Amino acid sequence: MPNEKQANMTKKTRKAQTISEKMIKVDHTGENGAVNIYRAQYLAASLRAPQLKPQLRHFQQHEEEHREIFRQYLDKNGLRRCMSYHLSGIGGFALGFTTGLIGPNAIAATTYAVENVVLEHLEHQIEFLKDDNTEAFTAVSMIYEDEKSHHDTAKAQLSQQTWMARIIVKLVKLSTEAVIAFGMR
């Protein structure tokens, strides 16, 4: 008897057809990127920021829970995940490992930048989905407070607005916005 994952793999899936479906696909992909950012930062933190390892593991667990919320939505609605799902994971890992090696300020700058864009994105989604798709609205609403907590924690830890931190924030925001725009097309 196949397990749930095997059964889901044999189900026919379809492309997202509505804006709300595309939003959830992008959210699922973004959570995969975030899981891998934190996974890589955790590995690199052993060298540069061991004091952040518990926090990074905690944030990663949140992102894994969020990814699962969106995976369940996709499965329930017979939707394929984004084509950029794995690319987002690889990019997230590369970003996380690089910034983890740079150190605590780069880790905080990365989290702050990603979550800043994500919060704007989620606020827009919540406003749109409340009247369009209650199931998608519920899924997005479930993760908002965790993402805000990650943002606020990173903002407080971003002690120095060094030139490097400013560059990381700009590049990461731009990259995050690009991933979202690519997924929504």
Image (cartoon, helix red, strand yellow):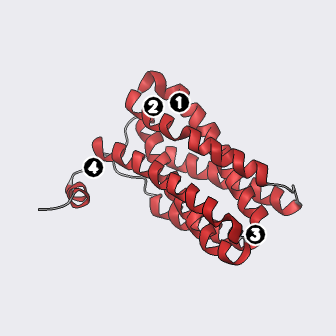
Q: Nearer the viewer, mark 1 or mark 3?
A: 3
Give the class, few, some or many, for how many residues have Cα within 10 Å of label 4's Cα (few <14, many ≥20). Answer: some
Q: Nearer the viewer, mark 4 or mark 2?
A: 2
Please give the residue where the numbered disc 3 appears in the rendered image. Answer: 103
For residue 144, above or below residue 65:
above
Instruction: Give the CA distance from mark 3 to mark 4.
Output: 42 Å
Image quarter hosting the N terminus: bottom left
Q: Is residue 101 left or right of residue 176?
A: right
Q: Is residue 185 visible?
A: no
Q: Identify the mark at residue 76; answer none if there is no mark.
A: none
The reply to whether callout 4 and callout 2 are in contact (CB within 8 Å) is no
Instruction: Give the CA distance from mark 1 to mark 4.
Output: 25 Å
Please give the residue where the numbered disc 1 appears in the rendered image. Answer: 126
Q: Give the percent coordinates (x, y) of residue 28.
A: 46, 50
Give the class, few, some or many, for how many residues have Cα within 10 Å of label 2's Cα (few <14, many ≥20). Answer: many
Q: Residue furthest top?
A: 131
Tell which circle, 3 or 2, labels the residue nearer the N-terminal end. 3
Q: Amino acid at mark 1?
A: Ile
